[in-house]
Every structure is written in structure tokens, then in C-alpha cells.
Amino acid sequence: LFNFNGTIVNTKLLALDIYNRIAEKDGYKKMAEEEIPYLSTLSIRDRCKVLNVPIYKMPVVGLKIKQRYQKHIPALNSVPGINELIHELKQRGYRLGFLTSNSKDATTQFLRKNSIDVFDYKHYSFNPFSKTKDISSFLKSNGLNKNEIIYIGDEVRDIKASKKNQVCSIGAGWGYDSVELLKKGEPDFIAEEPSDILTIVSRL
């Protein structure tokens, strides 16, 4: 079970561009591309401090970014190596799913454009901050047991959501949060690149 943005699709630079437009309008500190690696090591609270964004406004900023980049999702490329991983997992007989707060239309266009519209389960949410509920809802709606799932996400909040649902987790080190930050969430495994997931699942 994959988290979508950051894990399957590379949205970093797009999110940066949209955030900077919001920052310019609302008076927050703009972010340079070269700052991304450093900011990825910080918690959301510490990122807010660096960018002068009040912590209580971060959910609103996040929603604005999510809403504005829906029209761009179909044209984006998948994370390097993720296509090969998805097709190899599929070939090995794994059932694959994802969770996303992107629109169904934008997501479908992206999957087809990148030739990875092969998922067995697709779970859409309207709230990008409800990962714990999303995983729980996904399990219930598909009649799946928590022991049947491995959740792959690129943020600490993905790992925390997995733990609350007692689901095995893999931290995806190529996404929004750095490997160092992901480790603080104590995932069951860390994958620094998509191919590492094949090694992990083959041992389970």
C-alpha cells in the first residue's frame, strides 16, 4: 500500500513553486530549491519556524498547495525506479494499492501517462492530513487484515499512521522527509531507493 505524493509521484519542485507564490502573497519566507535537503531533515513544526509560517496556518497552506497542483499532476513523472518496482511487485503476485488526496481524474491521468495504472486498490481521501483514518478506512472498505498490509510512505506522519493501525511500515527515503527524520518515526524498514523494497519484501 503506497502513499502517493512523494512516494510514487515526484511533487517536490511543484510544491516548492506553489508554496513560494503563497509565501510571496502572505508574507512568509520563500524557499530556495537548494534548501529542500535541509528542510527535509526538520519536523513540520521546525519547518514552520524556519519559513515564518505560524504552525496553525500550515494545514491551510498545505491544502492550498494540494488544490493548486491538481491540474499539474497528470503531466508529472513518477519517481525514478518506482515504475520498475511496481511492475516487478505485480509480476511477483503482490496486490497493490495506494492512498491519495489527489483527485481521481488527475490521479488516473498520471497513472496512465506513466504506464502504471495497474493498482488493485485505489483509496481517495479529501483530507491530506488524515493518514491514520485513511489506512483504517482502507482496511475496512476492502475487508483486509492489518497483517496483510505493508504501508510505504515518505513522511514521519505516514509511519505514525501505520503504527496506530498496527501495520508494517517502510519509510521511503526519496520523498519529503529525509532518511534521518524517517528513522525518528521508527518504521519497520527504511528503503533509500525503490529497488530496496524488493529486497525487504523478499525477506518477509
Image (cartoon, rainbow, N blue to C red):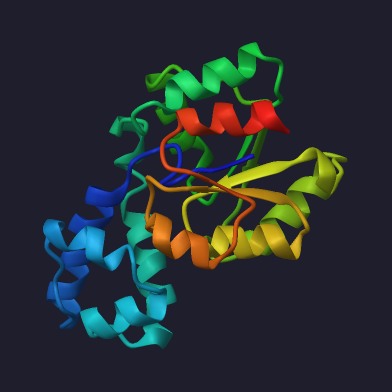
Q: Relative to the observer, which residue lies in front, 184 or 125?
A: 184
**Residue 21's spot in the image, x, y percent?**
16, 65
- Residue 168, compared with residue 50, is above or below; it is above
Horizontal side of residue 192 vs 87, given as left or right:
left
**Residue 26's spot in the image, x, y percent?**
19, 80
For the point 28% across and 55% down, which residue is it? 15
For the point 57% across and 44% down, which residue is it? 152
Name the quarter where the N terminus is drawn: top right
Tally the numbered discs. 0
Q: Relative to the observer, which residue lies in front, 151 or 99?
A: 151
Name the quarter where the C terminus is drawn: top right
- Would you identify the image quadrant in which residue 90 lies? top right
Q: Is residue 71 visible?
A: yes
- Would you identify the image quadrant in which residue 143 lies? top right
Q: Is residue 96 visible?
A: no
In the picture as drawn, the residue positioned furthest to the front comes out as 203
Horizontal side of residue 2 vs 24, given as left or right:
right
- Residue 75, compared with residue 150, is above or below; it is above
For the point 38% across and 49% down, which residue is it? 175
**Residue 119's spot in the image, x, y percent?**
62, 26
- Residue 60, compared with residue 191, is above or below; it is below
For the point 53% across and 23% down, which residue is it? 86
